[in-house]
Image: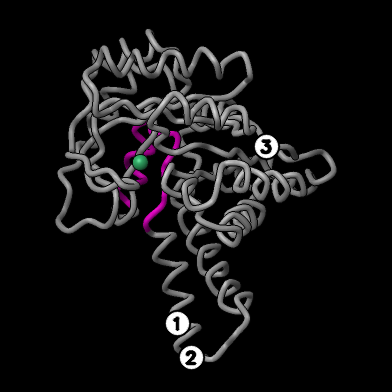
């Protein structure tokens, strides 16, 4: 089916107590792996790219690969700009055809974050494109930027959602991007509190390296989208290294690319099972046979 926005899938996830997995892709093989995993599990899925990835490739290149592959797929696929940092990049993503856009003003004071986010919602909404905002910092290194951990304030979150009109909100509950060097001080109970005042689906960043039960607990408390990036990179690169160490003279990139793709697919399936999104995609009618009621 064509690429779709994230509104319906995230609303269903929030109401149903499960989460949509959002997976960062760096190349064609990773996009293929993510959609193949979604098809195997009949799960809705979000493919996302950061500004750093888009500098390596380009918006239209990643979009074209995702669109071409998604059109052949019976499951719901959305392509999302992860950690968009400027209005200009958000507008470019919208023009290119991205169906979901994050504008991340979480390093700014509340008023400036609202002032950055609200205009993005204004241009996206009439085009049916979803917008994710962020309030409360996620720690660690995301893309090229270092951040410090910070917790989302309940009242500010309600005000932010109301004033900006975002469709989903990334919250700071103590997670950090990248691989954890020490155990994070996760305030999972904050998610339950935020769930009462934040009217839109909430997003968890920095889940790589958290124990499965911790991620599942966050989902049961109200997280409707979970981002996975670092673990997919590790899976891809590890599989390529392993392939090349066994056959160092191989000239064909397809050989080790396929090994990387298989490893990412397996990792995505593992993460989707943690999210509880298997069997939750609405399928195109001709493919709906066998879809669990
Ligand atoms: Zn993030």
Across and down, in percent, residue 205 comes to: 34, 41
Q: Which residue is drawn at 26% across and 23% down?
A: 193
User: Is residue 220 a member of the stretch shown in magenta?
Assistant: yes
Q: Which mark is residue 242?
A: 1
Are the residues tagged 1 and 2 within 8 Å (C-beta)? Answer: yes
Q: Does the residue labelled 3 lie within 8 Å of ligand 1?
A: no
Q: Which region is colored magenta?
A: 213-230
**Alpha-carbon distance for marks 1 and 2?**
6 Å
Q: Which residue is drawn at 39% across and 36% down?
A: 83
User: Is residue 1 a member of the stretch shown in magenta?
Assistant: no
In this orientation, which residue lies closer to the viewer: 106 or 57? 57
Across and down, in percent, residue 140 comes to: 23, 47
**Viewed as shown, does residue 289 lie left or right of 192?**
right
Q: Which residue carries the number 3 mark?
A: 3
In what element is the residue under mark 3? loop
Which of the 4 image quarters holds residue 164? top left
Q: Which mark is residue 246?
A: 2
**Viewed as shown, does residue 219 lie left or right of 277?**
left
């Amino acid at each position: 089916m064509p690429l779709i926005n994230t509104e319906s899938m995230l609303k269903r996830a929030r109401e149903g107590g499960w989460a949509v997995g959002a997976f960062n892709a760096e190349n064609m093989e990773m996009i293929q792996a993510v959609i193949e995993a979604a098809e195997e599990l009949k799960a809705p899925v979000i493919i996302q790219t950061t500004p750093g990835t888009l500098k390596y490739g380009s918006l239209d290149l990643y979009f074209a690969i995702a669109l071409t592959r998604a059109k052949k797929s019976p499951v719901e696929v959305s392509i999302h700009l992860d950690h968009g940092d400027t209005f200009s990049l958000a507008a470019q993503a919208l023009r290119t055809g991205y169906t979901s856009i994050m504008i991340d003003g979480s390093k700014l004071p509340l008023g400036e974050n609202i002032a950055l986010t609200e205009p993005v919602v204004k241009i996206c909404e009439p085009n049916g494109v979803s917008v994710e905002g962020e309030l409360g910092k996620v720690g660690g290194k995301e893309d090229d930027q270092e951040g410090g951990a910070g917790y989302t304030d309940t009242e500010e979150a309600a005000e932010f959602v109301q004033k900006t009109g975002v469709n989903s909100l990334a919250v700071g509950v103590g997670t950090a991007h990248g691989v954890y060097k020490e155990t994070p001080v996760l305030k999972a109970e904050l998610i339950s509190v935020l769930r009462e005042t934040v009217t839109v689906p909430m997003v968890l960043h920095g889940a790589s390296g958290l124990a499965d039960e911790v991620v599942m607990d966050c989902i049961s408390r109200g997280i409707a989208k979970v981002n996975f990036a670092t673990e997919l990179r590790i899976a891809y690169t590890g599989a390529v290294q392993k392939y090349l160490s066994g056959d160092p003279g191989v000239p064909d990139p397809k050989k080790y690319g396929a090994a990387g793709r298989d490893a990412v697919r397996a990792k995505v399936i593992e993460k989707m099972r943690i999210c509880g999104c298997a069997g939750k995609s609405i399928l195109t009618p001709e493919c709906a046979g066998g879809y669990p009621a």
